[in-house]
Image (cartoon, coloured by chain):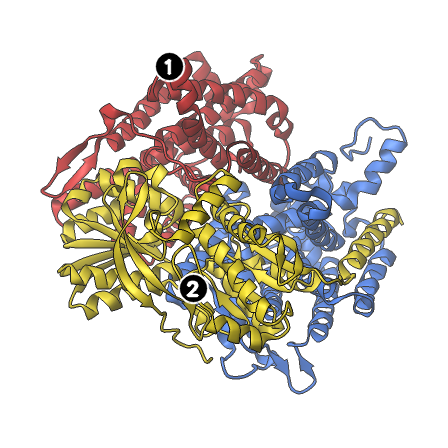
Chain colours: A yellow, B red, C blue
Amino acid sequence: MQHTLIHRSALAAAALVFSSLAIAQTGSKLKVGLMLPYTGTYAALGNAIENGFRLYLSEQGGKMAGREVEFFKVDDESDPSKATDNVNKLVKRDNVDVLVGSVHSGVAMAMAKVAKETGTLLIVPNAGADAVTGPMCATNIYRSSFSNWQPGYAMGEVMAKKGIKKVATITWKYAAGDEAVRGFKEGFEKGGGTVVKELNLPFPTVEFQALLTDIAAAKPDAVFSFFAGGGAVKFVKDYAAAGLKKAIPLYGSGFLTDGTLEAQGADADGLLTALHYADSLDNAKDKSFRLAYAKAYKLQPDVYAVQGYDAAQILAVGLKATQGDTGKKAEFAAAVEAARIDSPRGPFTLSRAHNPVQDIYLRQVSGKENKLVGIASKGLSDPARGCKL
Amino acid sequence: MTLATFLVQCLNAIQYGLLLFLVASGLTLIFGIMGVINLAHGSFYMIGAYLAYALAGPVAATLGGGFFATLVVGVLLAVALGYLLEWAFFSFLYGREHLQQVLMTYGLILVLEEVRSLWLGDEVHSVAVPEWLSGSLPLGDLMHYPVYRLFVSGVCLVLALLMYWVLTRTRLGMMVRAGSVNREMVQSLGIDIQFLYRIVFAAGLAMAVLAGMVASPVSSVYPGMGDSVLIVCFVVVVIGGIGSIRGALLAALLMGLVDTFGKVLLPQAAGVLVYVLMALILIWKPSGLFKAG
Amino acid sequence: MASVSDLFRASGHASTRSAAVPWTLLLALLALALLPYGAGSYALDFVTKTMVYAIFALSLELLVGSAGLVCFGQSAFFGIGAYATVLLSSDTGAASLARVLPLCMLAAAGYALLVGALSLRTRGVYFIMVTLAFAQMAYYVVHDTPLGGGTDGIYLLFKPVLGDWLDLDQALTLYRFTWASLVLVMALLALINRSRFGRALAGIRVNEQRMRASGYATFYYKLAAFTLSGALAGWAGFLFAVKDGYVNPELMSWHLSGAVLIMIILGGLGQLRGALLGAFALALLQELFKSEALFGGFAKHWHLGLGLAIIASVVCLPHGLMGMPRQLRKRLAGYTSASGETP
């Protein structure tokens, strides 16, 4: 009996919360669910993506296909084990019309499963996991960023063309790293090169010294690497500090030097990387985008902001064709597949598996920018292995 | 593996181990002397790294100092923070059940992370290596070993020796060692145990902060960096024996070797090896390698 | 560990009270059973998940509350149960529940047997650390080797069924099955606590040396409890994998081991209800602090609120939520000490 009070009040409180959870929401506002990392290692990326998305929306006067937009945000903490619960919050409690997310591939995989099962529209503004536009592909799942395979493959072709024969690869042992290296190997070996050593370390550890020593001992012609964020900063600095930069040229997928140049400083100078975006693109759309972004957020945009911006563009294209109805999936898909998205990265189209078919640029670090020095691969499309669309 | 490569890997292992020792020694002291499990110790390391980044500018502007001045200011701030935190928070944990300490310090981790996020943001940063330490020593025909990493090892060694001197040759050290063996006896001998605790806690925190500051040029400063260091430190403390500085040093070096060579020879098992080592040592010596003191 | 038993006695451990009918618990379980008739699909999802966590918390309660063994590696058994579910299912059709669930529990129990055999030799904080180490080992095996599909995890494409009449792919069926599992586990643990075995565990928790002196082979009692606890955690893991349709190495991370410890401490150690209450309390607390309706833009810093709430709960509620009425009554009756000590 002494527990009656606490039990009863707990039950009452719970009932109150649950009933509010159960109330369905109706109205003609377009509900956009943002599931991004707002805490943890990728918080800066989550913010950039949201900024990019909102910038496009404000350029359209705050409306998409005539509908006002209402945002629902969930912090995914880059934790795949909570991802399903978080997505369900957006899909079942808030009844969003569109899901936008995420950065971490594991989280995106959980989102893709729920989106496929419930038929909710999903636009992935970063996570490059091949599976999302591979075995999990669906009419209602889109990606505005890249697949891990793309930058790797492009870099492989470039390095083979340069006449490099023996390469050592180094990356984290996780899907993004594996897929990037796999793409690289495909492109490089096709051009006649050989990968002499494939090094990796557990994600997300950053003690590279042991492996750098290994690279020095193996004496390859060049090194291809895939790292991002804090790990990329440390790797580039460690590589230079170990004296390897002059002796064994370092190449990488563009994430090695994106958003990290401030921290890497002079150690990154001259590095060649491949990515679907560069800091000095010579097209009008990019120039106006960068100006508008800097004005609105007092920050320089990066590839993540562009991906967020383009996610909004894809949504707009589809909604225009269906007059704002997110339920008409076939028409939405048809419109998007036929469209040419005018992106700051340059125009791109979407493949049948809904992955961007885009130019991969070759960039070189100069000063504090990734300057465009050429096109690594024109109109590169991910092979979408395993997709049954 | 050639001899040259082997030697370089040993240097890598020792440097990693020594840095680990610096962080873990604070943890083992707090644990051994005060009997408090402090899950937030990794957060102190993170605070150190962010302090190195945040203080660099203001210190240069107001005091005209460089890296060393930043270190000194950072350590002083850490000691002050240690005093404050001990008085406001940790003193509540003495004599409590381990479970409650785990819970409260876990809550502290969350609070510290968010305070850092609110105050300094979520971006990744780097700290510049001071000019005169930024060279590399050539080892073998291709490899260079960064001078700064030798400096880091040096700092950790100096601090280890300093700790040894304080603990074995001063009265304060004697009280600390006695406290770690028998707290009640020390109290009944009339020694102000409250003051002792405060000093030990501030020292432990300052060492973790210093480790974070010194390591920041070679690691990057990013959210969540405390997490990765925390579990590893606990393993060091447990292998070495709670309360034993000697044990922490030996355990840290051992772990540095296992981790470094594990990564190179058995990359798939590298993550597990350290825990296998811990499990084996605990099965052989259930209280760790050395006793407290 | 005299102070630990004080903690338990003060919060009213089941074995020190007469066998009263737990009306409020039955009421709560009834409310949960009736929930599907009034709630939307999100609430159903949320409560299913929380019940799974409650079963997970109950498995730990057996170790910490009944036997006094603080295990910091419970997530390993949970994760093994979840991964076994996916690995035992096929990509082409639904597996049989009758085959998969027992095998999952067996796999989890097997690892628990191994871990227990090796770690029960250690004591106190060393035991905490060794259990953590073994959990980390399991984590790295799944995280770094091709066995578990790596960091991105694996999908469960077809959810298990039992013949024609139990299809766990249906949300309502899964809810009822989870509810039934919860009731079964609670009943099982209540029986164990009242049995000779349970009383022996309680004795070991209070004073192991005395038990040994009385002729009990305490190591084997503890090992049995450890293995059973692993099996129950594996059951919770199975339910989690079926609910999400997706497993990931983070299911074995020490953060989850910490979270489930928080659940049982928050709820109140020493009572099965504490585990149930704690699971719901932690889930609701997180929802509270993440709520944009209450905190607006600050909701993204919800870790701050949660951290402060956890700290506050330890300071103000040393016996967890279950001990709150006792504390309130003491305060009202004019006692100055709120630590639950009887004069």
Q: Is residue A324 left or right of residue A185?
A: right
Q: Please state, as top left, top right, bottom left or bottom right, where the C terminus of chain C lies in the image.
A: top right
Which mark is on residue B223? Answer: none
**Compared to A231, does C153 lie above or below?**
below
What residue did someone put label 2 on?
A129
Q: Is residue C143 visible?
A: yes
Q: Residue at x 45, y 33 (%)?
A: B45
Residue at image x 47%, y 50%?
A: A305
Reading the image, the residue beneath label 1 is: B169
**Callout 2, which amino acid?**
Ala
For this rendering, which residue is in front, B106 or B183?
Answer: B106
Residue C203 locus on image (x, y percent): 68, 49
Quadrant of the rendering where the N terminus of chain C is positioned: top right
| Residue A207 shown left or right of residue C169 in the figure | left
Residue B63 as seen in the image, left or right of residue A23: left
Within 10 angstroms of label 1, few (less than 14), some, or many (20 or more) residues? few
- Disc 2 to disc 1, C-alpha distance: 59 Å
Q: Is residue A65 left or right of residue C323?
A: left
Toward the left, the furthest residue is B141
Amino acid type at circle 1 is Arg
